[in-house]
Each structure stands twice: as C-alpha cells, then as structure tokens.
Amino acid sequence: MSESVEELARRLVELEVRYTHQQDVIEKLSDALYQQQRTIDALKARLEAQEKRGGGEGGAEPPDPEADRPPHY
C-alpha cells in the first residue's frame, strides 16, 4: 500500500511541476500579446495621423492602368 502512496505522491509532484511550467508559459504569452497589442495600437495611431495629414491613400481611387501606359503603346 505504501508503494501506491509513493506513486501518487510522485505523480502529484509531476503534475505540480507541469502546472507551474504552464502558468509561466501563459504569463509570457500574455505579456507578448500585450506588447503586440500596444504596437498595433501605436501603428494604427500613426496611420490615422498620416491619413489626416493627407499622406495616406486610404480613400484614394485605385490607379488607372490606362494612364500608366508608356507612350510607345
């Protein structure tokens, strides 16, 4: 009977180690996601500011392929 208790104790320790490792990985992923979202927000703000200044082509018409034809056509 003591062998099964020791086996259960070993398995419990293994599960606790796995849980701790998973918690660490989840925290690192959460931090990375937070940083990525901050970067996305900053890039969106820069893009919106550029579009307000008129430097963006957000609402511009697509270029006319006929207008870009070289003169020899």
Image (cartoon, rainbow, N blue to C red):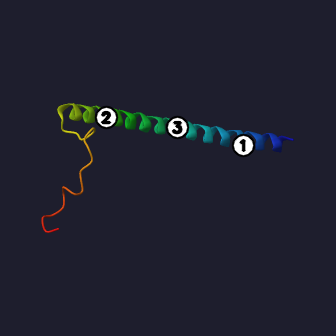
Q: Nearer the viewer, residue 61 or 73?
A: 73
Earlier residue among tags 1 and 2: 1
Q: Secondary structure at mark 3?
A: helix
Position of residue 14 measured from the top left corner of the image (x, y, whole percent): 66, 43
**Image depth: mark 3 or mark 1 in front:** 3
Q: Amino acid at mark 3?
A: Ile
Q: Amino acid at mark 2?
A: Lys
Q: Residue at x 23, y 34 (%)?
A: 51
In this figure, which residue is indicated by the disc labeled 2?
Answer: 44
**Image depth: mark 2 or mark 3 in front:** 2
- Residue that sits furthest to the bottom in the current view: 72
Earlier residue among tags 3 and 1: 1
**Image depth: mark 1 or mark 2 in front:** 2
Q: Residue at x 72, y 43 (%)?
A: 11
Q: Residue at x 83, y 41 (%)?
A: 2
Q: Amino acid at mark 1?
A: Arg
- Residue that sits furthest to the right in the current view: 1
Q: Is residue 28 left or right of residue 63?
A: right
Position of residue 44 measured from the top left corner of the image (x, y, whole percent): 31, 34
